[in-house]
Each structure stands twice: as C-alpha cells, then as structure tokens.
Image (spheres, coloured by chain):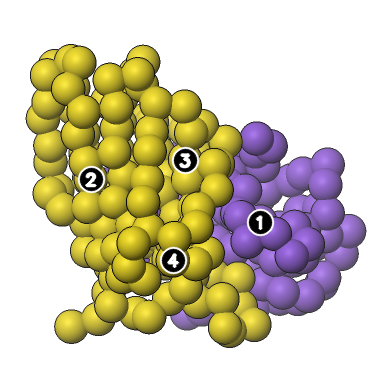
Amino acid sequence: GQQLNQSPQSMFIQEGEDVSMNCTSSSIFNTWLWYKQDPGEGPVLLIALYKAGELTSNGRLTAQFGITRKDSFLNISASIPSDVGIYFCAGQRGSNYKLTFGKGTLLTVNP
Amino acid sequence: DGGITQSPKYLFRKEGQNVTLSCEQNLNHDAMYWYRQDPGQGLRLIYYSQIVNDFQKGDIAEGYSVSREKKESFPLTVTSAQKNPTAFYLCATKDLGQLINEQFFGPGTRLTVL
C-alpha cells in the first residue's frame, strides 16, 4: 500500500524551540490528520484538516492542508518536554474509509 | 467509561502457536480496524470492518484472521502462518455516521513471539 513521505524522520531540539514537520504525496487527499504517539501507547488525534488551504490550531500546534491537496505540515511552537513522542500524518482519499500513514517523526526535546 | 480496550497489554507466545488479540469498544462506532506497527515504521493496515459480519483485507492480511460477530468486538488472530508476528498491534474505530474521517485508537498490544 501507498505510504506518505513524512519528514524529518527525527528531530532533536531544545526546550522552547519551534518545530516543523511535513508530509507529501504524489496523490491527492481529501483529509489530512495529525496524530501523536507516546511510547507504548496508541496514537492520539491532534488536528484534523478537511479543506485545501485550511489552517487549524490546537494550542501550540498549527497544521495546514496544502493547496495542492498533496501535502500537509505541522508546527509546534515553544516546545516543552512533554511534546516528546512520535508524530504521524495520515491521509484519506475519496470515499475510501482507509487511512494512509506516514512513517512518523520522532521528536526529542532537551530540557 | 467510554473508549477502546485492547487486552492484554503485553502478550508472549511460542513460535507456531496461534494467538488472539482482543479489541472492544463502547463508542458505538461502526467501523473497526487492525494495524501493525514495527519500529521506525508507520501503521500498516491488516484488516478492517465497516459492519457486523463483514470485513475486508488490508495491505498485510496474510497470516492474520478476524471476525466481527458483534458491533463492539473485532478480535484479531495471529496465526502460525505469519512469518514475523512480533510487533505492536493497534485497534482503531471510526464513526461512519459522522461527516468526519478521524480514526480513534486503542492503547495497543505488544506481541512477542519467542
């Protein structure tokens, strides 16, 4: 099955720094989702995007649905130690109920 | 307490044995999904079900089987035919009645085959 190209694979940052990660695809998606996974737990939904160009915030997190509908990015501002985890993008195409996932970005925040 | 329950959290089995992973939900969601996660990999779809008594293969169904006898339950059996069964298994649900595409995940089961 197709997977999304998510980058970077990992990031090591200092507390207080801003973070940016993105997902790209050669295919058009009608929904983009961003999840966070803590070690040994299931992913938790952070932000859902449904319209091209849409910019949505959830606290210090901001995500955008790319104009071409082939990409999305997630920004985290003023990172804190509890931001540590794996961030996944996921996209849905057409009326298919299946999601396609990126391989994840592992974020490490140094206090 | 609403949500998705996966049990057990950790499971150990000997090679060649079948093992069944449990997934129960009380969210009244129509669709249920099973994913496999390996280190450094994204989530890969094993099987999914949109309605009771019906299910479809995902991208990596070989060596796995499922059943959907009740709306609340979607157990996954890892058979001895699965070549590399050690992994983290995640169950997810989705409400097909809502105009949203979010899937919600359970806490996962880590299966180790010795």
- Compare marks 3 and 4 and give the one earlier in the sequence: 3
Residue B80 or residue B54, whichever sits in front: B54
- Disc number for residue A91: 1
Q: Could you confirm whether marks 1 and 3 are on the same chain? A: no
Q: Which residue is mark 4?
A: B52
Which chain is yellow in the picture?
Answer: B
> For the residues marked 2 and 1, what is the alpha-carbon distance in whole angstroms?
26 Å
Q: Could you confirm whether marks 2 and 1 are on the same chain? A: no
- Compare marks 2 and 4 and give the one earlier in the sequence: 2
Q: Residues within 10 Å of mark 3 (few under 14, many from 20)?
A: many
Tell me residue B96's x, y (percent): 56, 76
Report helix, strand or loop for mark 2. Answer: strand
Report helix, strand or loop for mark 3. Answer: strand
Nearer to us of marks 1 and 4 is 4
Mark 4 belongs to chain: B
* Colour chain A appears in: purple
- Disc number for residue B46: 3
Tell me residue A38's x, y (percent): 30, 53
- Residue A107 appears anywhere in the view: no
Residue B15 or residue B53, whichever sits in front: B53
On screen, residue B36 above or below B73: above
- The answer to whether the residue labelled 2 contacts the one labelled 1, judged by CB atoms less than 8 Å apart, is no
Q: Name the amino acid, label 1.
A: Gly
Quarter holding the N terminus of chain B is bottom left
Mark 1 belongs to chain: A
